[in-house]
């Protein structure tokens, strides 16, 4: 089955170029020019990936990303004309899977899309139908839902990816660099601070006492591990 992608940008010429290029790779491409239409399309359709510009009419790309994460874990690449590190971290905090800055080379964009689609397909093949329970924590890999003492914890896509990796490799210590490369990918433009931010947020959602964690522990000077 061909991959289905949603491209969201209010610059119609850019959308036209991206749509044409992706269709050459036999992808099905839908388009939206504002945040409200984008959100509506994601609710109505099953996409393999969303390419989402930050600066949009009606709802910003970050607002759209945040609302999508309330009901879907579809991979999202944020696009922006800004290049500050804080913007990149902020975009990922809202649940994005990757970040690319305008102006970009369409070949680089296509490479990033293919990489995310490969990781997504591989992960689905590995964990489909599997379920892990560790003490009061339950992780459903198929539905990408996490429950703590029976109550659902609302994780972002990257928080879930981190927890999934940790829980499938208990006791293994991951350095921040290893986590960045494994979960975000070698071509991710951010730095190891992104890992610390996500681990802290994840602990806040699954630990009774985030300052004295039971699940995600720190090996000082080395990295993080799942207990």
Image: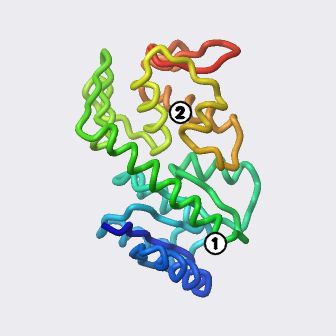
Q: Residue furthest front?
A: 25
The residue at which mark 1 appears reads as 106
Would residue 155 be found to the left or right of residue 10 on screen?
A: left
**Camera-side residue: 130 or 46?**
130
| Quadrant position of the N terminus in the picture | bottom left
The residue at which mark 2 appears reads as 201
What x and y, as percent, mark residue 14? 61, 81
Question: Can you see residue 37?
Answer: no
**Camera-side residue: 38 or 131?**
131
**Point 72% across, 49% down: residue:** 86
The answer to whether residue 2 is above or below residue 24 is above
Q: Which marked residue is nearer to the observer: mark 1 or mark 2?
A: 1
Q: How many marks?
A: 2
Distance from disc 1 to disc 2, alpha carbons, whole Å, reads: 33 Å
**Point 55% across, 65% down: residue:** 61
Name which quarter of the figure residue 57 lies in.
Answer: bottom right
What x and y, as percent, mark residue 185? 59, 44
């Amino acid at each position: 089955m061909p991959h289905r992608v949603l491209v969201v940008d209010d610059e119609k010429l850019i959308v036209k170029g991206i749509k044409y290029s992706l269709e050459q790779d036999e992808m099905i491409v839908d388009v939206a020019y504002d945040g409200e239409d984008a959100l509506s399309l994601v609710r109505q359709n099953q996409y393999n990936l969303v390419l989402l510009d930050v600066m949009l009419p009606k709802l910003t790309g970050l607002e759209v990303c945040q609302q999508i994460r309330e009901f879907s874990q579809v991979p999202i690449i944020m696009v922006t004309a800004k290049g500050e590190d804080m913007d990149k971290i902020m975009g990922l905090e809202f649940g994005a899977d990757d970040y690319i800055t305008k102006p970009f080379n369409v070949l680089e964009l296509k490479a990033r899309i293919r990489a995310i689609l490969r990781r997504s397909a591989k992960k689905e093949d590995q964990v489909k139908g599997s379920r892990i329970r560790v003490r009061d924590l339950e992780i459903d890999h198929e539905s990408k839902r996490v429950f703590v003492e029976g109550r659902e914890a609302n994780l972002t896509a990257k928080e879930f990816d981190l927890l999934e990796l940790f829980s499938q490799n208990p006791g293994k210590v991951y350095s921040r660099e290893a986590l960045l490369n494994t979960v975000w990918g070698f071509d991710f433009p951010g730095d190891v601070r992104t890992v610390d931010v996500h681990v802290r947020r994840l602990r806040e959602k699954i630990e009774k006492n985030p300052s004295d964690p039971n699940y995600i522990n720190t090996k000082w000077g080395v990295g993080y591990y799942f207990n």
